[in-house]
Image (cartoon, helix red, strand yellow):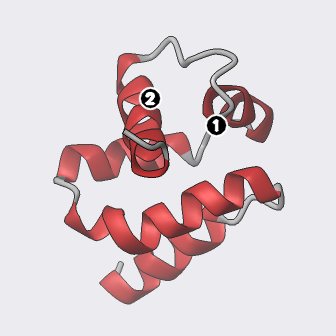
Amino acid sequence: MSAEVEKKRLYWHSRRGMLELDVLLVPFLEEAYPLLDDEDKARYRRLLECEDQDMFVWFMQRGEPEDPDLRRIVRMILDRVQPK
């Protein structure tokens, strides 16, 4: 799959239809994803396979993924938007 097709596919999968998720995932995809190593890119793609309700809970910090790889990518996304 070409890089441009992959980018468009990821963009549409990042648009979840839930504003709270869209404002986290789309900017992450556009700004941070290109800089990730291959393992973190794979983690992001796995995250996109998760249910919106689960992601909402994780990003609102009402729970966290059991899977350590998903926990890592969720934390990376949250770290970008939370003040230090």
- The residue that appears at 64% across and 72% down in the rendered structure is 12
- In the image shown, does 39 or 26 lie closer to the viewer? 26
From where the camera sits, is residue 2 visible?
no
Residue 23 shown left or right of residue 76 in the figure: right
Residue farthest along the front direction in this orientation: 84
Circles 2 and 1 in contact, beta carbons < 8 Å: yes
Residue beneath disc 1: 50
Is disc 1 placed on a helix, strand or loop? loop
Asked which quadrant contains residue 60, the reply is top right
From the image, which quarter does the C terminus lie in? Answer: top left
The location of residue 77, given as percent across then percent down, is: 45, 46
User: What number is the disc on residue 70?
Assistant: 2
- The residue that appears at 69% across and 18% down in the rendered structure is 62
Is disc 2 placed on a helix, strand or loop? helix
From the image, which quarter does the N terminus lie in? Answer: bottom left
Please rate how many residues cluster around mark 1, counting C-alpha atoms within 10 Å: few if below 14, some from 14 to 19, many from 20: few
Residue type indicated by callout 2 = Leu
Please rate how many residues cluster around mark 2, counting C-alpha atoms within 10 Å: few if below 14, some from 14 to 19, many from 20: many
Residue type indicated by callout 1 = Cys
Reply above or below: 63 against 20: above
Q: Earlier in the sequence, mark 2 or mark 1?
A: 1
- The residue that appears at 35% across and 26% down in the rendered structure is 69
Reply above or below: 84 against 31: above
- The residue that appears at 31% across and 53% down in the rendered structure is 41
Asked which quadrant contains residue 13, the reply is bottom right
**Between marks 2 and 1, how big is the CA–CA gap?**
10 Å
The location of residue 10, given as percent across then percent down, is: 51, 68
From where the camera sits, is residue 53 visible?
yes
